[in-house]
Image (cartoon, helix red, strand yellow):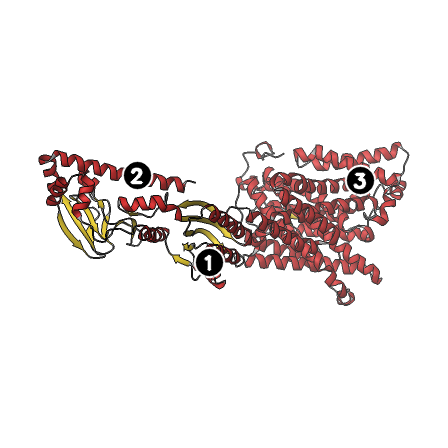
Amino acid sequence: MTDPAIGFTPSAGLNPALKRALNDILGGSAASVLTVTFGLSYALLIFAGPLSPFLSYGIAATFISSAVLAAVIALGSSLPFAVAGPDSSTAAVTGILAASLVERIEAAHLPLLPPVLLTLGLSTVLTGIVLGGLGLTRMGRAIRYVPYPVVGGFLGATGLLIVLGAIRVITDHPVQLATLLHLTNGVTLSELAAACVMALVLYLTWHRSRSPFGLPVILIAGMLTAHLAFWITGTSPEQARAMGWTFQPPPPAAFMLPWHAEDLARYPWSAVPDLLGNLVAVIFVTASSTLFNTTGIEVAVHREANLERELNVTGVANVLSGALAGYAGCVSVSRSILNFSSGGRGRLSGLTVAAISLLLLAVAPELLGFMPKFVLGGLLLYLGADQLHKWIIESRKRLSKLEYLSLIAIIVIIVGWGFVPGILIGVVIGCATFAFSAARVESIKYSFDGSEYRSSLDRSRDDQQVLLAHGGKIQGLNLQSYLFFGSANRLYQHVKHLLQERPECRYLLFDFKLVTGVDSSAAYSFAQIKRSAADLGVELILVHLSAAAEKVLRSSDFVGEGVAIIPELDRALEWCENELISQHQELAQEEASLRDWFTGMLDSEDDADALIRRCHRIEVDAGEIIVQAGDPADSMHFILDGRVGIMVPADEDRTTRVRSLGRYTTIGEMGLVSNTPRSATIQAEVDSVLYVLNTHQFDAIKAEDPALSHKLLTYFVSVMAERLTFANRTIAVLRR
């Protein structure tokens, strides 16, 4: 039953509050079915092998943990319908912790139960304290930065451990080289085969429907089938237990608090350092399961949760559970979604689960005495195999080949060496994988040269011809992403190849505008670039270099002779262009004649003289406003000497230069023709000399000298065409 619309709903005539309460109780009861069933299997998983005689204490710890976790998280969760309890992953690592302790206790010939209960309680309390600390300090989100293959490998390893634990529950023997002979006799193989069939049935039925009553029906059917087979073959219940087909009926669930002075004094504290790895695993799995399960519930029911609050509440719940000798747990995705789908929306659902868990303390041991091992063992096999399928099979579609191989390696390391080596080596593998992947990201967004991408300074046709002919001497690289030893080395190789292909290059620009950071190891690659450039006489120009990046590059002595830092790309291009022009215009006129300019523009000395007579000369100082944005466009300007800038408004009452115009260029011709208001402010950047042609004089030229008017309009069109061509080339470069 996965659709609330088809679930049972109380009569519409009931009081709305009572109706909501009944829905919550119904949803909580449905979720309790999973809690009870999983609880029995988790108890068997943890209290297996040498701890099996104390299974009654394990059952008590399981259902006390289920009750405490369900009640506390129901009362405090940001998702009121959330149902919590021990989880398969937390149970698996808790079982590993208990098994590790038992190995050391048996070697010291000490009593088993008190130290195990103390270890469960202390580990759960410590887990709760760490979770609360992560929630209060808002550091819980840091687990999101753990590489995905590490988390996947960790959880995949818990799935494999659940499978191995299931085999131990079924056969009473751990999966080791020394016990392989015990796993090859006929009865054991028959038990394992029956458990595999049970797991397959669960996959084919309950896995696909997720009905709240599907799991108990399947388990009861499996139990009845087993007892029917015993009856047909003439096997008595005592014989079935002796052969290992069914569990020995444990005594009634026993509850015992381990916090006694004598037990604390006899605790093997010397074994604690050896248990730290498994303790870290319990904390890590509980924290990651809390965050991942909460996120899974958010996605499934389209509700937003408060992750810090979930960590705090889960921490309190685990502290209380540990104080009662319970073990760690967290919010459950399957149980919470089942409750939500059954109509549960309030906190009464979780309280219902807690109440039913406490009631089962009296019934669960008797129920377990009739349960064939392959039934609950098959359930554990299914849970472990389902987790393995998720992280080994399904994750293959989401991960690259390198990430997937690292995930498999982490699983093998954890199962073979333990959780702490697995985590540490996994983080190292994750970081190395990230570094390798990041190094493959292209650090160059696009490249350009000075013939196709120039500064915003308008220049004379002679200057433009120089830049067109020699623009290849200016090479630019627009950098991006984070530069470290991998990506910076690829940049060095690119620059080396570029300088070989373009031996004429004399100015190499690096635009750091899109660079998010520079690693100190990248400075070595830039030092190599500097040496290669110096050998060829190439000057380096750094643009948009952040203070942090500059500090890193200066620390390696990269910034110095042969390296210039200019704040803006436009200014850097202008500086390079000026250097080129000064080098290649050996016969450039220092003092230009307005008459010569106009004669070249109009192809007639008479027309040049006529235009000069219509213009009037002005001189402006650096910083002086020539025209203001919004003023009537009643004139155009011929710039004989100097330079002016086109300024547009920016934030905080500032202005930004969008273009500059140098000597032998014009400005305002379109406004003169269209009679539209000024769209920008024109300001002198240096002391300048301009000749102004106003609207009245232009109208007079059109009326009195049509030939001159036609030549002027033709010139205006050619200027606009040149500027449009330049703009198109710039756009083409930026779209690379």
Q: Label 2 to label 1, Cα distance in Å?
A: 36 Å
Marks 1 and 3, the one that precedes in the sequence: 3
Q: Secondary structure at mark 1?
A: helix
Q: Position of residue 255 (x, y in %)?
A: 75, 55
Residue 279 relative to residue 176: left or right: left
Of the image marks 2 and 1, the number of the one nearer the N terminus: 1
Left or right: residue 77 versus residue 167 is: left
Image quadrant assignment for residue 424? bottom right
The kind of residue tagged 1 is Ala
State whether residue 581 is above or below residue 607. below
Going by the numbered disc 2, the residue's amino acid type is Leu
Q: Position of residue 428 (x, y in %)?
A: 64, 54
Disc 1 to disc 3, how far (Cα)? 63 Å
Tell me residue 339's x, y (percent).
61, 41
Q: Amino acid at mark 3?
A: Phe
Q: Which residue is mark 1?
A: 549
Q: For this rendering, which residue is in front, 281 or 4? A: 281
Q: In the picture, residue 221 is in which quadrant?
A: top right
Q: What residue sits right under mark 3 in the picture?
A: 374
Seen at 16% across and 34% down, the residue is 710
Label 2 sits on residue: 724
User: Which of the two discs, 1 and 3, sits closer to the camera?
Assistant: 1
Q: Quadrant of residue 346?
A: top right
Instruction: Please tell me the numbered disc located at residue 639.
Output: none
Residue contact between numbered discs 2 and 3, judged by CB atoms under 8 Å: no
Residue 222 vs 150, above or below: the answer is above
Q: Which is in the foreground here, disc 2 or disc 3? A: 2
Q: Helix or strand or loop: what does disc 2 sit on?
A: helix
Quadrant placement of the N terminus:
top right
Dot 3 crowding, Cα within 10 Å, few <14, some 14–19, many 20+: many
